[in-house]
Amino acid sequence: MVDAFGLAGPLLRLLQPETAHDLTLWALRRGLAPRDSAPDDPRLATTFCGLELSNPIGLAAGFDKDAAVIGPMLGLGFGFVEVGSITPRPQPGNPKPRVFRLPEARAVINRLGFNSAGLDVAEDRLRAWRAAGRPGVVGVNLGKNRDSADAAADYAAGARQLAPSADYLVIHVSSPNTPGLRALQGRGELEAILARVRAALAEAVPQGRRPPLLVKVAPDLTPADLDDIAAVALAGGLDGLIATNTTIARPAGLTGAHRGEAGGLSGRPLFEPATGILAELHGRTSGRVPLIGVGGVASGADAYAKIRAGASLVQLYSALIYEGPALVGRIKRELAGLLARDGLASVAEAVGTGKP
Ligand SMILES: Cc1cc2nc3c(=O)[nH]c(=O)nc-3n(C[C@H](O)[C@H](O)[C@H](O)COP(=O)(O)O)c2cc1C
């Protein structure tokens, strides 16, 4: 079997990042992916917003934007996969090149700008996935079209169309690459969007289980922004938060020829700021709002730090580019070892127990 990233990894890294990504998706769709068939350590089993997962490590949004490789990515050992961001109508995103590796910093800068095949393509693929009845938690991350004047209508359209095939839904208002998007994190804007999306959900899933509604936030929020978001969450406007997206900040000392490129920075330099925002949200919501921690995770210790800062689940993307698919199994083994070391029987026992 060809190892889609492992053996080919050094070769893939000679290509433009987006070309390498397209080639990886192509190989994954043809079944050229490694599988992690080892059962998960029972300590890693957990629940999130009523969903049951065999481990808390997930694939962050942006890798599988169009729901093309759900099965292969779950097969790598992820406990859950988040597809998207998906915009209502197809759109190409920003001009290329728009993804840059900073290998010295183990980081990535992207300004993709929501390239998306649109809701219809995603719906067909998600329905086919559901019809196959295969196990695995699949979240759906919703975006808005760049030229849309009514953001709430876009998120509501996404929820209406994809809720029946989503285990959870994410309102993505934190990309730095779509003009005006991050302003939607303000209290009034967020409440208005959530009200429209909830109405759409009631229509789309009149009976039975409605998918939990999460909001994904930026790492570049002020304390006042965080107060607003926590207030909306505590008022019951949403079911959980994802912290965080990429940052527009450029930490002092950032290395790499592409460090001056515009866009969102992810990977190792994001770990500290994203974990800080996560801890702030955990504190502001007194641990009452389920959180997913994402940003710079590349080891079991990183995942454990996110969990101790308040995350019930953890996601990653950038480290996969540098470490390849064996990373997922390694993180799970290391995390199970850390829980055992600290005498904890489950991930849930560790949530929010310490400072990062
Ligand atoms: C190339 C690339 C594309 C991304 N696209 C999306 C996206 O479409 N929607 C989204 O919510 N986040 C997107 N993200 C952000 C990731 O989901 C994640 O929040 C961020 O990269 C931090 O995690 P990491 O440091 O493990 O990569 C993208 C990240 C990268 C690197």
Image (cartoon, helix red, strand yellow):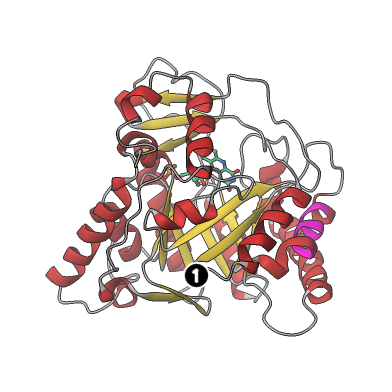
Residue furthest bottom as drawn:
207
Residue at x 71%, y 67% (from the top left corner): 163
Q: Quadrant of residue 268?
A: top left
Type of secondary structure dominating the magenta stretch: helix
Tally of numbered tags: 1
User: Closest to the observer: 159 or 68?
Assistant: 68
**Residue 230 pos. (x, y %):** 57, 66
**Residue type (three-letter) at the residue carrying disc 1:** Pro
**Residue with the mark numbered 1:** 135
Confirm whether the magenta stretch covers residue 155.
Answer: yes
Up/down of 140 relative to 178, above or below: below
Residue at x 61%, y 44% (from the top left corner): 65
**Residue 334 pos. (x, y %):** 20, 58
Residue 224 in view (yes/no): no
- Few, some or many C-alpha atoms within 10 Å of disc 1 (few <14, some 14-19, many ≥20)? few
Residue furthest right as drawn:
149
Residue furthest top as drawn:
257
Up/down of 13 relative to 64, above or below: above
User: Closest to the observer: 181 or 257?
Assistant: 257
**Residue 7 pos. (x, y %):** 30, 33
Residue furthest front as drawn:
1
Element under label 1?
loop
**Residue 206 pos. (x, y %):** 80, 81
Confirm whether the magenta stretch covers residue 70.
Answer: no
Residue at x 29%, y 47% (from the top left corner): 327
Q: Is 353 left or right of 52, judged from the image as shown?
A: left
Residue 94 in view (yes/no): yes
In which quadrant will I find the C terminus?
A: bottom left
Up/down of 38 relative to 17, above or below: below
Q: Which residues are magenta?
A: 154-160
In which quadrant will I find the N terminus?
A: top left
Residue at x 35%, y 53% (from the top left corner): 35
